[in-house]
Image (cartoon, helix red, strand yellow):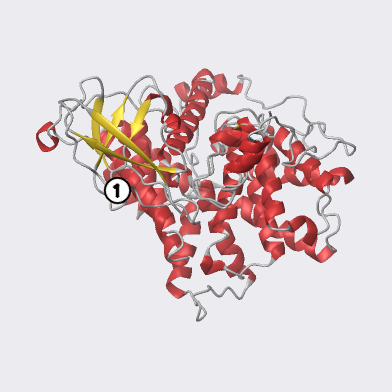
Amino acid sequence: MLNKELSHFAENNKSGAQISDYLYSTYTDKKEPDVDLSRGLQLDELTVVTTTKTLDTSMSSTTLMGQITGIQPATFTIMSPIPELGVDTHHVDELRLVLNHINDWGLDTFRIEDLSGQRPLTVITYHINDWGLDTFRIEDLSGQRPLTVITYRIFQERSLLRTYGIEPHTLISYLLTLEDHYQSVPYHNKAHGADVCQSMHVLLNASALDGVFTELEIMSAIFASAVHDVDHPGVTNQFLINTKSDLALMYNDESVLENHHLAVAFKLLQADERNIFSHLTAKQIKTLRKMVIDMVLATDMSKHMQLLADLKTMVESKKVTGNNIIMLESYDDRIQVLQNMIHCADLSNPTKPLDIYIKWTDRIMEEFWRQGDKERDLGLEVSPMCDKRVASVEKHQVGFIEFIVHPLWETWADLVYPDASAILETLEQNRDWYQARLSPPSSSSTGTNLSNSSPPLSASTIKTTAILSSNNEDALQSVSSQSSLLNTVSVDTVISTSVNTVSTGDQLIPTSAPVLSSTSSSISRTASSTTASSGSAGEFQMTVTPATS
């Protein structure tokens, strides 16, 4: 079914075909092997194969196959005092405030990463439970330690240290070492690990899942999300297979990176000073390890269609209690929900506030394009969506949401109804926003002089985002090349605007702007009302109203 839909999507132009190829090759587990069954090679094919075999495609020529690659020395000693938020920083107050939204969707892990290195850090932690938490602020304040700050706060929030006898020093030692093993790549880095971990934490708070999972299952889920991309090299499984890397050879081309993430995560636990599960019973450790393995392997995007099919089956046959709590009686049912939950968390960027979503999009595209450059240098075929010369970011995001993200989140929202309804609304509004940039309405229908060839939007090119109201009315996006949306939109404000006519200094783009939403009461989903402007032609008025709980 997906293949048929993608065929129509690919018919228009070259970029559509590239996006279709990417979605099919990445999110489906192809049963038919891509092998050559012919008797031999033509002369020109033989030349190509001989050439590529001589290229240096190894990840590390000095690594022994029997060893787990990427392990580094620890940076934390058991004698070190433990700071309040797990890391030394001069921004404790601000970071504590942000982390107060740890239960909120869209936590800005980038902000946490920046904050936790030097004192506003304390303030930001107050938002650790919020949907829409400003992860970018956490990145700013944490001195590149967002994963340690967020995961440590979640363990505290859920009383996991007390429940399982985890020493704070041991947890900090493990988290800092884990964070050091995330590579400095554009997307699959420690900020992404922190973002997925906090997203998983929020999803576990769904009222439909209240009391469903045991504390051991919850700790397994938080741990799995924190480690799920450790030591990611910034290239895909298929790239590692095509270049005959040691990792692909070690794991026989099956979920190469996911197996590696698990191996590194569990290897780091072997040191006594980092073994956070030392007080668990043998049975608990066996159960936790199995669940973590099952969840991290589910982050292999080629498993997407099977996960979605299983989730749809569960929704159709789900049983609930009188309080609308889902009944999950077997291990298979329970792990299936957790697998889909971590998959949702891993594919949650398009459901976050628009400014955060755009920044993640910039990062993943940069990582794709770096891989494409490597493939070109190696004489390999450039993977779909990795060729920056023909890529359409807007069309890719529309297709990505339409065919992959929305079906998944729509089904998840059905499972935990009504908990994820606001998240689904934000996703749809973000899709409409990208669609409007791809195919802006004609000037006759909007009364504005619109350009059909505006450059792709990035987080650094947004001047303001206008949200007219919470009932999905159209809004106007004002785009400038100088200032950032980060200066305009925050989790604590909703924005209203009135526009009299076109501002000659900016490009006005009609679209449905996403309304910042939250699963907690700390963020209001009600935007202030639109008022008529009485200003002169070209006037653009902005009103910022603090959200009420």
Does 526 sit left or right of 172 as displayed? Answer: left
How many numbered discs, if any? 1
Observer-nearest residue: 44 or 104? Answer: 104
- The residue under the point 27% across, 24% down is 454
Q: Residue furthest left?
A: 444
When the figure is inspected, residue 331 is found, relative to residue 73, above or below; the finding is below
Does 6 sit left or right of 52 as displayed? Answer: left
Does 291 sit left or right of 27 as displayed? Answer: right
Q: Position of residue 117 (x, y in %)?
A: 68, 30
- Disc 1 target residue: 469
User: Taking the image as drawn, is residue 288 in sight?
Assistant: yes
User: Taking the image as drawn, is residue 439 in sight?
Assistant: no
The quadrant of the picture occupied by the N terminus is bottom left
- The residue under the point 16% across, 30% down is 501
Q: Position of residue 492 (x, y in %)?
A: 47, 43
Q: Residue furthest front?
A: 534
